[in-house]
Amino acid sequence: MIDRRTFVAAGSAAVLAAAIAGPARAAGSSIAGPAHRFLFSGINGQPLPLSAFAGRLILVANTASQCAYTGQYRDLQALHETYGSRGLVVIGTPSNDFGGQEPGSEDEIAGFCTAEYGVTFALTTKVRVRGGEAHPFYRWAAETLGTLNAPRWNFHKYLVGPDGRLLKAFPSAVSPRDPRVVAAIEANLPG
């Protein structure tokens, strides 16, 4: 088992290396890839590398516990339950970037998500999702799909294909169970 200090040091080095490397552009494509090179820290402090989900579809959403969209946790959990066995991985990335709506500690966030919404999908430690200090995944996503598809509020969602390509972005107001999200998930499930 890796202790939290070792992971933070190793994770920081991996994230720094990914940030320095920058996004790789596919030939003839404006879509950068792959997302699998990025590393998050799970809310429990354990490594959460996106490479662990290569071959699976990934839905990443920046989350907050005190937002008008917080009820979307329920919808993200429903997607996890419906499509998890078919290859969908849901990852929530708590962020305090918008309106200070995620002020709690990782333990408080995890407790809230479990008690209020029965969340069993992966959650990361709190991350920045905008600006120069944004997590490298979010900087890459904004560069890949353009700043108009960058998070403007909590519960912005990115869909990453099984090959690590960034497929789509869905703004905060689009529910995870919106027909457009469900159609994109069903069209890109592995196998």
Image (cartoon, helix red, strand yellow):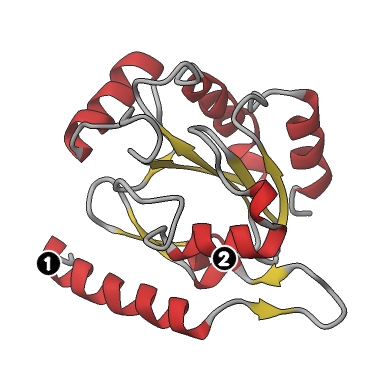
For residue 5, which numbered disc appears in the image?
1
185 displayed left or right of 102: right
Give the number of the disc on residue 87.
Answer: none
Residue drawn at 52 percent across, 33 percent down: 155
Q: Is residue 47 left or right of residue 59?
A: left
Where in the figure is residue 149, as x and y percent of width and height?
A: 67, 48
Whether residue 19 sits left or right of residue 4 in the image: it is right
For the point 80% across and 70% down, the residue is 30
Among the 4 quarters of the image, the one containing residue 65: top left
Give the residue type that dot 2 points to: Trp
Quadrant (top left, top right, bottom left, bottom right) of the C terminus? bottom right
Mark nearer the N terminus (2 vs 1): 1
Position of residue 119 measured from the top left corner of the image (x, y, whole percent): 40, 27
* Residue displayed at 71% across by 58% down: 145
Instruction: Say which of 9 and 23 sits in front.
Output: 23
Residue where numbered disc 2 is placed: 140
Task: Judge left or right: residue 91 versus residue 12.
Answer: right
Q: Secondary structure at mark 1?
A: helix
Q: Amino acid at mark 1?
A: Arg
